[in-house]
Image: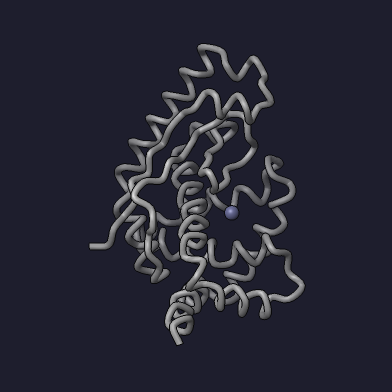
Amino acid sequence: MRNLPKVLVTYSRIYNRVLSGYEERELTADGIRRGREQAARIQRTWDGHSKCLLSQMARISGLEWKRKEIRAYVVSSVRYPFSEPLTLWIGEKGENLDGQITSLVHELAHTLFDDNDGVLKGYWKRLRESLGGETESTIVHVPVHGLMVETFRAAFGKDSERYLKQERWWESSKANPGMKDSYARSWNLVTREGAASVVKRLYESRALSKR
Ligand SMILES: [Zn+2]
């Protein structure tokens, strides 16, 4: 059995406050209670799928989880999730647990790639060369989306659409206008090539890196 990290979903009121620029509304008793409840709900849902999703991500990519523990902070004061430190948005989509699980898998894919940067050097170089003219954000999200598709399919079969639909939501969202074009571009690239082929190139790059 591979080593899998423990993902701990946490509400931090000081982090939320700093990210909001110290807006008082982010520190109301009600806001804090909501944040804590949300973190607990996401944790419970994640714990039901954690082992399956994390082990599929490692198996499919051929990459190793390097950390024992990954903290995922939930905050209401950002407009979109990001990976370092792993931060989930509990705004418009906050109550949608399928959406939160999808965001976690997306951000954890970035974590997995970042932590395996050494063996992926050649992979990124070849990908950038083959996708000349695409933005860095589009390029980075090709293996992220490829791995998401293959992971959800392996974990949930037909139900994977339920989660993949959540990821496509960002393309029509106003939450992150800078990202929506690159998300749409990378999805199109993954659809055109096929997610299985995208992750196969990722998987095989480890062997190439050892030569
Ligand atoms: Zn991303």
Q: Position of residue 106 (x, y in %)?
A: 51, 53
Q: Position of residue 151 (x, y in %)?
A: 41, 61
Q: Residue at x 63, y 64 (%)?
A: 186
Report the side of 96 relative to 69 (left or right).
right
In this view, the residue farthest toward the right is: 133
What is the quadrant of residue 123 in the picture?
bottom right
Report the side of 198 relative to 170 (left or right).
left
Q: Is residue 179 above or below residue 190?
A: above
Q: Residue at x 53, y 52 (%)?
A: 165
What is the quadrant of residue 91 in the picture?
top right
Query: Which of the pair 11/33 is nearer the observer?
Result: 11
Q: Position of residue 55 (x, y in %)?
A: 32, 60
Report the side of 16 relative to 41 (left or right).
right
Is residue 162 visible in this depiction of the protein?
no
Q: Residue at x 48, y 73 (%)?
A: 119
Position of the C terminus, as image quadrant, is bottom left
In this view, the residue farthest toward the bottom is: 211
Q: Is residue 60 above or below residue 29?
A: below
Query: Which of the pair 159/180 is nearer the observer?
Result: 180
In this view, the residue farthest toward the left is: 1
